[in-house]
Amino acid sequence: MRQLSLRVRSVLLAVALLALFAPFTVVILEEAYTKSLTQAKMSELRLMNLGLLSAFELDGDLPYMPEILYEEQLNLPGSGYLGIIVFRNEVIWQSASALEYTFTPPDIDVPVGNELFVESVEPDFSQNSEYFVYAFTAEFASSRDFEPVRFYIFNDKALFQQERETFLTTTWQWIVTLCLALLVFIVIGISVILLPVRKLIDEISQASSGNKEKLDARYPVEFDSLKHSINDLLHTEAAQRTRYKNSLGDLAHSLKTPLAVASGHKGLPAEVSDSLTQINRIIQRQLKRASAGKSGWQSAINVEPVLHRLADAMDKVYQDKALVIDFDVSEDATFNGDETDLMELCGNVLDNACKAAKNNVLVSAKTAGAWLQISIEDDGPGIPANKKTMLLERGTRLDTYAEGHGIGMALVADLVSIYEGRMQIEDSELGGASIIIKFPQKR
Amino acid sequence: MRILIAEDDSRLLTQLDALLQQHGYSVDLADNGEHALFLIKEYSYDLAIIDIGMPKLDGFEVIKKARQADITCPILILTARDRWQEKVEGLDAGADDYLTKPFHDEELLARAKALIRRASGQANPTIQFGPISLDTVSEELSLDGQALDLTAYEYKVMEYLMLNPQKVISKTELTEHIYDQDFDLDSNVIEVFVGRLRKKLDPSGELKPIETLRGRGYRINRSL
């Protein structure tokens, strides 16, 4: 299964964290807010209760309360604040705000000198409604003795709940907005952080497709060692490839000179001479095959200059034939492989074409879709149908072909195969053979 | 015809020397690049056969430096490195043809002759002046289609004259091109060869195939 990209992973992680922490944050804020609001309510009700206490007087057994209280809320009906005073288990006073209610002494009994704050009660006078209650009991001197007088302040919780709901709604709205903003910042931030990684990947991809010889963009300091390691690797690979080719070239050189001496020896028996020729062919072909090959890290080769150099060389070699080598080569035609191999391949085909040609050779190269197509045509005698099949069979020995399509064409077939290309042999409009070679272009 | 062979393998050098001498060429030998460059600059050659892989100075450098010094003699590269990359590099450097090792003697001789002939502006292997015909492939001189019996040196003199019909060739130049480098020869010998050639080519004395320019040398008679 395909692994998720770093960006998707980061975004998913951020979403998961936000989905976990956002509700927690709201719950914690709501809890703190409710507590703080409740505490404030208790203080408010305590003050109100103290107001009642300070206004209350007991003259013998006769209680006295002023008509208008200092606490305005207790004077206004519908304010949600209700005050009652209980003496000898009877409600002896109720605030003007509580005129519409009928009270019985509440069940809440508080010892003298103590207070009690209850956050939620459903009192008898108002069913289905929740109230805060603050109760305080104080002793007053009656005609008999000191007797307890209980002071109660009720406060409707509806307003409190409404305030809390408003806070929650607002908090959620802000948290969600903040989360979305945070997510956008995270996505942008990740893109910015991953920018050098993307650049690095792009450069590596360019190097692997042969469009760059080394990584030369500037990266954050953390990538320095990686960049240097990759460049070292590229350099080592290129150097090793060159060394390998040179070593094989040296090997060919050191084998062929003594072979030339042996072949030039007078009076050599025919079978020995044939064997030497055979050895030479094997060296020629196998060493070239061994050193040929593509590497993913090679630069793309522009085909045109290679073909021009070869044509110039042919002009010199076949000066006596006064051949006209025409070109129809697209400037953007590139070969993804080694220049030596391209030159070897085209050199052999062009050499054969020049050998076979009477007057004209046509060299064409173009990029056709995902393929590089090189074709070399001549106006020579052409290649018979049975020879065409032989030439296309990789590894076939073609030493006997009179027009010069000898071991060179076997090498061409090898190189085409190594580069996963295709070779066709057709009849040219010029009258001779047309060798068409195609190579897949790197994506 | 005078040929320079530059090759670091002594056995191959000896073989080539013997082969070319056997076919009537005067041969100078060099077993390293520096010596080859000295010789090619110092003497006038009709052909230089130069190996690429040589000590001191490789073949490419010898060719480049020789061409920079305006040496125009044809150069045949002899190389064991048979990749097109190297062949093209050699031809780019100024060589005129290449031959990869190992090679057949016949191929080397054919290439050498073709290059010498081409350098003299002759595209055809047979050079004709009136009734006189020189076949550079079979190394035969004919008069009215009849092959003449010539000694090796007589052939060399006639070949050199016919390959360079546009110029007056001094006795010294002729000597240099038909004899080995250190062969000290009296210039009268050339006169003897020319005299013999005149007799064989023009027994009646009407044709006058070889002109003598007093104090300058000889030239083939182009109005034949």
Image: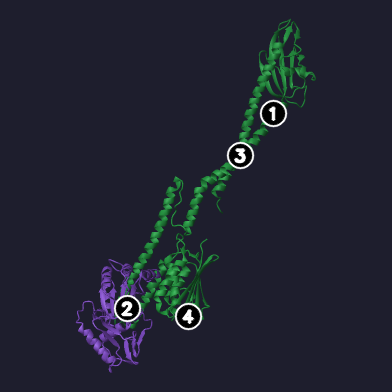
Chain colours: A green, B purple
Residue B150 percent coordinates (x, y): 27, 89
Please tell me how crowded label 4 is: few (under 14), some (14-19), or many (20+) other residues with Cα within 10 Å: many
Q: Are marks 2 and 1 in contact (CB under 8 Å)?
A: no
Please tell me how crowded label 2 is: few (under 14), some (14-19), or many (20+) other residues with Cα within 10 Å: many
Instruction: Give whichever of discs 4 and 3 has the lower sequence position.
Output: 3
Judge left or right: residue B96 versus residue A49. Answer: left
Task: Name the residue beneath numbered marker 3.
Answer: A179
Q: Is residue B68 above or below residue B135?
A: above
Q: Are marks 2 and 1 on the same chain?
A: yes
Looking at the rendered structure, the kind of residue marked 3 is: Cys
Tell me which chain the residue with mark 1 is part of.
A
Task: Name the residue beneath numbered marker 2.
Answer: A263
Q: Is residue B49 above or below residue A173?
A: below
Instruction: Give whichever of discs 3 and 1 has the lower sequence position.
Output: 1
What is the spatial separation of the Cα atoms under label 1 and label 4, in whole angstroms?
Answer: 101 Å
Task: Name the residue beneath numbered marker 1.
Answer: A163
Tell me which chain the residue with mark 4 is part of.
A
Tell me which chain the residue with mark 2 is part of.
A
Q: Secondary structure at mark 4?
A: loop
Residue A294 percent coordinates (x, y): 45, 64
What is the spatial separation of the Cα atoms under label 2 and label 1, in whole angstroms?
Answer: 110 Å
Mark in front: 1 vs 4:
4
Residue at screen point 61% across, 32% down:
A28
